[in-house]
Image (cartoon, grey):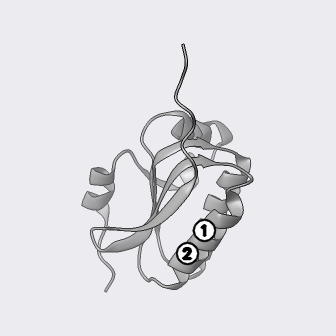
């Protein structure tokens, strides 16, 4: 059986119920990390209030990608901002649970669940 080739890494700005953020897709590995860091840094600096990282379309996330998410959480935490991570059940969610960081992040199983919980920035 031949599978489909992995989707190339990409990141784009999104807004979920007034909360700014980024949607990530494809494979987040060591090669993609510099682009992800740059996109997150820019989006976080240009926004206020709760911030969303949508991982619904991420097919693979390695330890370098995990460290970027924890870095974003720390950046936002210094400003007392929340980070909402949209991550449905699957391999990426299992990785969070296996390495013990699921409790450090506010995880939502769907965009709809995250939108229902978010309060727009003042």
Which residue is at a point 72% across and 48% down the rendered structure image? 63
**Residue 4, image x and y in percent?**
52, 29
The residue most toward the top is: 1
Question: Which residue matches tag 1?
Answer: 72
| Number of dots carrying numbers | 2
Q: Which mark is residue 76?
A: 2
Which residue is at a point 64% across and 36% down the rendered structure image? 98
Which residue is at a point 32% across and 53% down the rendered structure image? 111
If the image is split into quadrants, where does the N terminus sit? top right
Q: Nearer the viewer, residue 96 or 45?
A: 45
Q: Is residue 55 visible?
A: yes
Q: Nearer the viewer, residue 43 or 116?
A: 43
> SS at mark 2?
helix
**Residue 80, image x and y in percent?**
51, 79
Q: Does residue 23 appear left or right of residue 116 in this picture?
A: right
Q: Quadrant of residue 120?
A: bottom left
Q: Quadrant of residue 116?
A: bottom left
Q: Does residue 64 appear left or right of residue 98 in this picture?
A: right
Would you call the spot at circle 1 few (<14 residues within 10 Å), some (14-19), or many (20 or more)? Answer: some
Q: Which mark is residue 19?
A: none
Q: Quadrant of residue 89?
A: top left
> SS at mark 1?
helix
Mark 1–mark 2 distance (CA, rounded to whole Å): 6 Å
Q: Quick check: 99 above or below 68?
A: above
Which residue is at a point 31% across and 86% down the rendered structure image? 122
Q: Is residue 51 visible?
A: no
**Residue 58, image x and y in percent?**
52, 46
The answer to the question of whether label 1 and label 2 lie on touching residues, with beta carbons closer than 8 A, is yes
Would you call the spot at circle 2 few (<14 residues within 10 Å), some (14-19), or many (20 or more)? Answer: some
């Amino acid at each position: 059986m031949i599978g489909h080739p992995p989707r190339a890494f990409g990141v784009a700005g999104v807004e979920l119920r007034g909360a700014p953020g980024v949607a990530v897709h494809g494979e987040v590995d060591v090669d993609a990390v510099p682009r992800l860091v740059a996109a997150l840094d820019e989006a976080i600096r240009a926004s206020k209030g709760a911030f969303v990282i949508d991982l619904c379309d991420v097919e693979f996330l390695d330890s370098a990608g995990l460290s970027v998410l924890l870095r974003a959480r720390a950046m936002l935490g210094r400003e007392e901002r929340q980070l909402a991570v949209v991550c449905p059940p699957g391999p990426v969610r299992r990785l969070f649970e296996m390495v013990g960081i699921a409790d450090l992040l506010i995880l939502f199983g769907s965009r709809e669940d995250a939108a229902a919980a978010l309060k727009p920035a003042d």
